[in-house]
Amino acid sequence: MAKETVQKHSEFEELVENPDALAERLTTGSEDFVKKNKTKLLGVFAAIAAIIVAGFLYYNHRTTQNQEAHEAMFQAVYYFEADSLNKALNGDGQYDGLLKVADEYSGTEAGNLANFYAGVALLKQGNYAEAQSHLEDFKSDDYLLQARAYSLTGDALSEQGKYKEAADLYNKAANHNSNAFFSPQYLIKAAVAYEAANDFQAAANTYDKIIKDFVTSAEVTDAKKFKARAEAMTGAAAN
C-alpha cells in the first residue's frame, strides 16, 4: 500500500516538474475521453450549432419583418397625420392600413407602434372598445409614450362609462415615471373620473395629491377649487 502511494507521489512530482509530461497526460486523457464519448459530443455540438443557426435566422426574420412593417405603415401614418382616419386604419387599396399592420406584424416594433396609432384613430372615431383593445396591446420603453397610452386607454374606458377603471388608468399614467408636467394632468383626469363614478372622497384625495405633490404645477389652482367641491359633495352624499 505504501509502495503504491510512493509511486503515485512520484508520478505527481514528475507531472508538476515536467510540463511536457503534464501536456502528454492531458492530451492522452482528452483523446481517450473523446473516443469514449464521440457520439455524445457530436450530438452536443450539433445541438449548439442548431441553436445558433436558429437564433440567427430568427433575428434576421424579425429584422426583415420589422422593416416590411415600417414600409407598410409609412402611408398609413401619412393618412393618420392628415386626419384621413378610415384610410389610415384600413388602407387605400394599394397600401395596408394600421389595423392590418398591427395584426400581420404583431411582435415587431412597427406592429406595436401601429397599435398605438390605431388606438388613437379608433378613439377619434368613437370606436371606444376597439380603441381600448389596441392601446392595451401597445407596450413601450419610452416612459412618456407609455404613460400617454395609459391615459388614452383611460379615455376609452371613460367613454364607455367605466369610470373607476378609467381612473385606475389615469393614476397609472400619472405614476409611470412621475413628472411635474404630465402627472398633474393625468391626476386631474383621474379625479374627474372618480367624480363621474360618484366617488367624491377618492376625487378629493386625488386633487389633494396634486396640491401637495405638484405645488408649482398649472393644475394646482383648479385642484384646490375642485377639491372643495368634491369634499362638499362627499358631505352631501353622506347626508
Image (cartoon, rainbow, N blue to C red):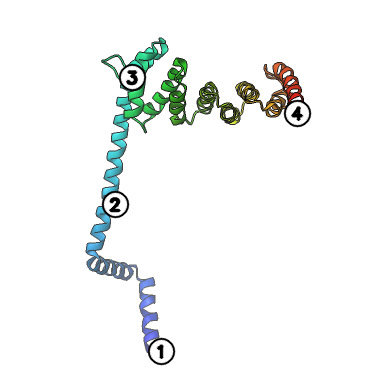
**On the rendered structure, is 39 left or right of 153?**
left
Q: Which mark is residue 48?
A: 2
Element assignment for label 3: loop
Are there few (<14), some (14-19), or many (20+) residues within 10 Å of tag 1?
few
| Circles 3 and 1 in contact, beta carbons < 8 Å | no
Tell me where residue 186 sits by quadrant: top right
Tell me where residue 138 sits by quadrant: top left
**On the rendered structure, is 68 left or right of 204?**
left
Task: Give me the C-alpha separation between circle 4 and circle 2.
Answer: 69 Å
Front-most of residues 141 and 36: 141
* Amino acid found under the numbered disc labelled 2: Ile
- Which residue lies at the image location 22% right of the left edge and 63% below the top edge? 39
Element assignment for label 4: helix
Are there few (<14), some (14-19), or many (20+) residues within 10 Å of tag 2?
few
Question: For mark 4, what is the residue?
Answer: 238
Going from the N terminus, do you reach mark 4 or mark 2 first? Answer: 2
* Amino acid found under the numbered disc labelled 4: Ala
Q: Which mark is residue 97?
A: 3
Question: For mark 1, what is the residue?
Answer: 2
Going from the N terminus, do you reach mark 3 or mark 1 first? Answer: 1
Residue found farthest to the front: 239
Q: Nearer the viewer, mark 2 or mark 3?
A: 3
Q: Position of residue 192 (x, y in %)?
A: 63, 21
Task: Give me the C-alpha separation between circle 4 and circle 1.
Answer: 96 Å
| Circles 4 and 3 in contact, beta carbons < 8 Å | no
Q: Nearer the viewer, mark 4 or mark 3?
A: 4
Q: Nearer the viewer, mark 1 or mark 2?
A: 2
* Amino acid found under the numbered disc labelled 1: Ala
| Circles 1 and 2 in contact, beta carbons < 8 Å | no
